[in-house]
Amino acid sequence: MAKDDVKQAYKLVGTRVLRPDGLDKVTGRARYGADFAMPGMLYGAVARSPHAHARIVSIDASKALALDGVKAVVTRADLPEGLTGEDWNLQENAMAGEVALYDGHAVAAVAATSALLAKDAARLIEVDYEVLPHVTDVDEAMKPDAPVIRPGAADHTVPDGMPPNVVKYFEFGRGDVEAGFAQADLVRERTYRTEATHQGYIEPQACVGQLGSDGKGEMWVTTQGQWYVRKMCADLLGLGVAQLRVTPSEIGGGFGGKTTVFMEPLSLALSRKAGGRPVKLVMDRAEVLRATGPTASASMDVKIGMKADGTMTAARAEFRMQGGAFPGSPVNEALECAFAPYKLAAVEHIGYDVLANRPKAAAYRAPGAPMGAFAAESLIDEMARELGLDPIELRLLNVVEEGDRSSYGPKFKRIGLREVLEATKVHPNFSVPLGPNQGRGVATGFWFNYNGDTSVSMAIAEDGTAQVAVGTPDIGGGRASIGLMVAETLGVPYEAVRINVVETGALGINEPTHGSRATFATGKAAVLATEQATREMCRRAAADWGIDPDAVEWVEGAAQPAGPNAGKFPPMSIAEIAGNMSNTGGPIAGHWEGVPRGVGASFGTHVADVEVDPETGRVTVLRYLVVQDAGRAIQPDYVEGQYQGGAVQGIGWALNEGYVYGADGRLQNAGFLDYRIPVASDLPMIDTVIVEVPNPGHPFGVRGVGETGITPPLPAIANAVAAATGVRLADLPMNPPRVLAAIRSRMDD
Amino acid sequence: MTTIRVTTEVNGDRVEFLADPRETLLDVLRDKLGLTGSKEGCGTGDCGACSVLLDGRLVSSCLVLGVEAEGRKVETIEGMAPGEELHPLQRKFLEHAALQCGFCTPGFLVASKALLERNPDPTEEEVRYWLAGNLCRCTGYDKIVRAVLDAAAEMRGAG
Amino acid sequence: MIEVNLWSGLRHVTGGATVVEVEGATVGAVLDALVAAHPGLAPFIEAGVSVAVDGEIITGDRFAEVPDGAEVFLMQRLKGG
């Protein structure tokens, strides 16, 4: 069978096995970032700017250093100069240079013999600031008289004459949109805004870093990607990349926010200055919210033309996003995903990446896509209501399928959006009658999915069990899904395979667990590595039998002659071959390195039922349905878990979450009390339907499921609120004061 | 810096430690006693990842000072399954895949145990409100609530 | 010949063209040929691009094959969470 054919019947793939790391995680034994301790370890703390924008005139650490037990203080002067591009951005974000660029920007760090002492010492570091004018809102930052955050930061994409805080400019599309609008029976144009939200992982950033004067170092860290941490820390400190060994801990959530570095390089800088003693740095929640990756805030114009039957004739999006005081907001991804579910002959996208005095945005689950979907799907819903069209039928009328040209350019390969919409239409939730003040909202979302650099190594143990070294930290059941795929390929019980997430010294480079890639890319690499080992086992059996290796095949955990002409030999089991390997040529292993081809995109449709309290403006989610194409669900529990978790993060973004900046540019809600993520009592059960349209590019049909689930909730909830109240909120979050004001403004009309 | 000698009982064992009066019970459990199963997600009592039982009462150990443990009884996640057998809640969390990253899981288990000790037959709504002080960012709570309800049913059947 | 579809913002550096015909059997050869035809594209390509070949988005593989007559789109490099 060709390796890209997708098999249909499996023994293990698709079963709901227990996760192999589960026991450690229900007993408190699993070791996360802050759970490591080393002999001789010091504790670090970071001093941070209280100003949104301020020139650092001087830093005086003499009082801190005078404390008994304080071993080192570092500032930007302790980091190498001359970095460029994203390396410079990362270094500048890790520790401010001449100017503090946002409230919470690190300005100095200290290491001491206890955590309390380190915090005391950080408070004694005296920084003289010259406060500068600041701007935190994206539209304000684009005004010609806005404070200029970094003169000359615009790159080659920005045409002359743009406002100085615009640092990247995007423009893509096709067809004649004006002609498309002219053909439409209904054209609408609206502006939408979303506030920045935080990934909100419950585990704060934490690491222990150790660096000697010989330039060799080690780090234990909570991260989505140990090789990214290694490369970034090495570049920021001027080290040889391979001289740093980075071991990932268990990870307490990341959602994109742990694909980069913040204080991790500082632990190494402190360690080097403190004679090579390990330094532990653990952020508190306020530091996480003030200084680690939130997503961008957005201001978005959308214009769509439709025929009376709902056929879309043209669409245009112009999005502005600030991703903090650094380039890199996901405005391009937001544009590419906004209209991806729809067949369009004419479409235009324009995007501005804008600087503002906020923390450097990090990736957050399908970066940009939720905002783009909010704008596009809100307007599509408004127009469907105006034309009296069913939201699913309208989407089926314009649905993209294999061979259709995507809104962002290339043609789609095999995709499952039609199957998703059909499954939504027949789900019982879709026909539950609604009461007064209740409304139903439908929205669709999209994510590309991704492959990326991948290295996997596997080996057969003496008893025929198998170990697999993978480089993508297990963030939500990855060991289980990879274990199932390897065991299925090897023909052994799931329990006979151990998946080890390994340190950087053990494999070639791997990109992080991001882009919904781990089950696709690491999984595919693990299958290919396993097939290398089974080929070798077939070769050993063939040698024993004295027949041609090509005449031996691997079936259900054993080598056996491939057909009657190969000879008559009883199957030789993996245990037999493994037990004898030291006498037949030594170790049996397999490995695969590369960028696995064959990524399959994923679409989802969500249906939200809400009730809006007309007295308070509070929105209660009554029912919630997620329908999404997984390609193949390797372990359905964890696929459902991704759907449910993505939906609830989106519900939080829609209803409650958002960064609140005061007029002074300081973050006013830097804690879980005021930055309120959804809690159990806010929610109903989250119903799920796993649609399986296999991806032909993966041996088991996997597409990747982590990200698409957060793309429809923002508009699904907004559309439901509009249905319940008759008023449409175009700004997120739709918290009770905003909803109440909208209801009252309707009553005033 | 003055430290205070504290004697307390943790998971049935008598322990002694020296605490800085500013250190929380969570700091002491994690840094002095090596019990890192209780997690710090916020340090302000908002996330529940550090939930422990103090004389049988559910508390956020980040809001209790270490010195306040003097003469008290502390139960943490590490004491939930003292032998080879898991507590039914731990087993049901595994069976229902009620964890993704697992960081909030110890807090949810301790809080759920406190719930079922006081109310062996909670409704879904009662489970959701009792656990409203425990934040989970991965699961959307669906599978957690199901696991708690299933564990409660099994424990009632066994009792 | 390969027809490469550029994003429309690039027409400022290609004299207005958003489709450029080049020779090249691999992604790398196509990118090099694009820069040779329009040197203004160099900073955009050096900053990192993804190349969609017959619908498959390829990132980070200059040796990936581009069949003759393939439909090729230049895209900004993707990132994921």
Image (cartoon, rainbow, N blue to C red):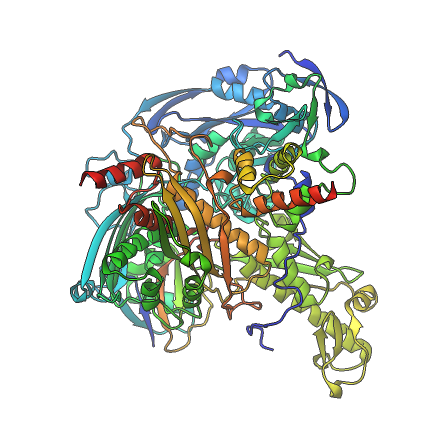
Q: Nearer the viewer, residue C11 or A378?
A: A378
Q: Position of residue B91 (x, y in %)?
A: 69, 46
Q: Quadrant of the C terminus of chain A?
A: top left
Whether residue A704 can be seen here: no
Q: Position of residue B149 (x, y in %)?
A: 61, 44
Q: Nearer the viewer, residue B151 or A554?
A: B151
Q: Is residue A261 left or right of residue A609?
A: right
Q: Position of residue A28 (x, y in %)?
A: 67, 38
Whether residue A620 can be seen here: yes
Q: In terms of image quadrants, where is residue C66?
A: bottom left
How many labels sit on residues? 0
The single residue placed furthest to the bottom in the displayed view is: A565
Q: In terms of image quadrants, where is residue A576?
A: bottom right
The single residue placed furthest to the left in the displayed view is: A182
Q: Quadrant of the N terminus of chain A?
A: bottom right
Q: Is residue A611 left or right of residue B44?
A: left
Q: Is residue A474 above or below residue A218?
A: below
The single residue placed furthest to the top in the displayed view is: B2
Q: Position of residue A166 (x, y in %)?
A: 27, 44
Q: Is residue A173 left or right of residue A281?
A: left
Q: Residue at x 70, y 80 (%)?
A: A550
Q: Is residue A592 above or below residue A164?
A: below
Q: Residue at x 35, y 53 (%)?
A: A373
Q: Is residue A51 left or right of residue B102?
A: left
Q: Residue at x 80, y 84 (%)?
A: A568
